[in-house]
Image (cartoon, grey):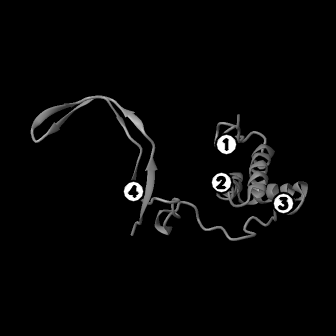
Amino acid sequence: MSTKIRVHVRSYRRKAFTARRRGKSVRTRAARVRAHTKSVKDVGLPGRTPPSRRFLPPMKPGMLGVSFHEPAQVRRKRLVAKARRFGEKKIVGRLRAIHVLTKNTNPSVSKKAKADAHYVAGAFVGKRRVRYGKGFRKRR
């Protein structure tokens, strides 16, 4: 059920074009379209993904066994131990999910999760490291 909203359209210059109307070709000259208002469907903010389309399993608070209020050294020591037990890919994947899903709601936690994912991935020598451009975009 969508609602309609009224939007203001600024004036603009329309290019010449040829259209087919009632089976005939009609040439339309270039013209200046005056400013006007019109009703459009309100698309609003994108909604949540329905549960059937979600690709991440639901994560409960404290699932990783760390709190992002702890110092980085303590937190990372626990995360590396978990990664040794359950696998680096699983822990880094969950940290990446936290990083992406909390970008707007809790930016400080998001930054910590990203840094921790890099640290955990780098802690496993000889394994594939998570570098910029491979899962993470480097800001310019």
Q: Nearer the viewer, residue 51 or 90?
A: 51
Q: Which residue is mark 4?
A: 40
Which element is circle 3 on?
Answer: helix
Q: What is the crowding at mark 1: few (fewer than 14 residues within 10 Å), some, or many (at least 20)?
A: few
Q: What is the crowding at mark 4: few (fewer than 14 residues within 10 Å), some, or many (at least 20)?
A: few
Q: Which residue is mark 1?
A: 136
Mark 2 and mark 3 lie on one chain; the one further toward the N terminus is 3
What kind of residue is marked 2?
Val
The quadrant the C terminus occupies is top right
Mark 4 and mark 1 lie on one chain; the one further toward the N terminus is 4
Mark 3 and mark 4 lie on one chain; the one further toward the N terminus is 4
Does the residue at mark 4 contact the one at mark 1 (Cβ under 8 Å)?
no
* Residue at image location 59% in from the left, 65% down from the top: 57
Which one is closest to the eye, mark 3 or mark 4?
A: 4
Residue 78's tag is 3
Cα distance in 3D space between marks 3 and 1: 23 Å
Which element is circle 4 on?
Answer: strand
Cα distance in 3D space between marks 2 and 3: 21 Å
Expressed as whole percent of the image width and height from the top left, the position of residue 115 reads 78, 48
Cα distance in 3D space between marks 4 and 1: 37 Å
* Residue at image location 40% in from the left, 66% down from the top: 2
Task: Give the image quarter of residue 17.
Answer: top left
Task: Give the image quarter of residue 73.
Answer: bottom right
Which one is closest to the eye, mark 4 or mark 1?
A: 4
Q: Which residue is mark 2?
A: 100
What kind of residue is marked 1?
Phe
What kind of residue is marked 3?
Arg
Task: Give the image quarter of residue 103.
Answer: bottom right
What kind of residue is marked 4?
Val
Q: Nearer the viewer, residue 106 or 21?
A: 21
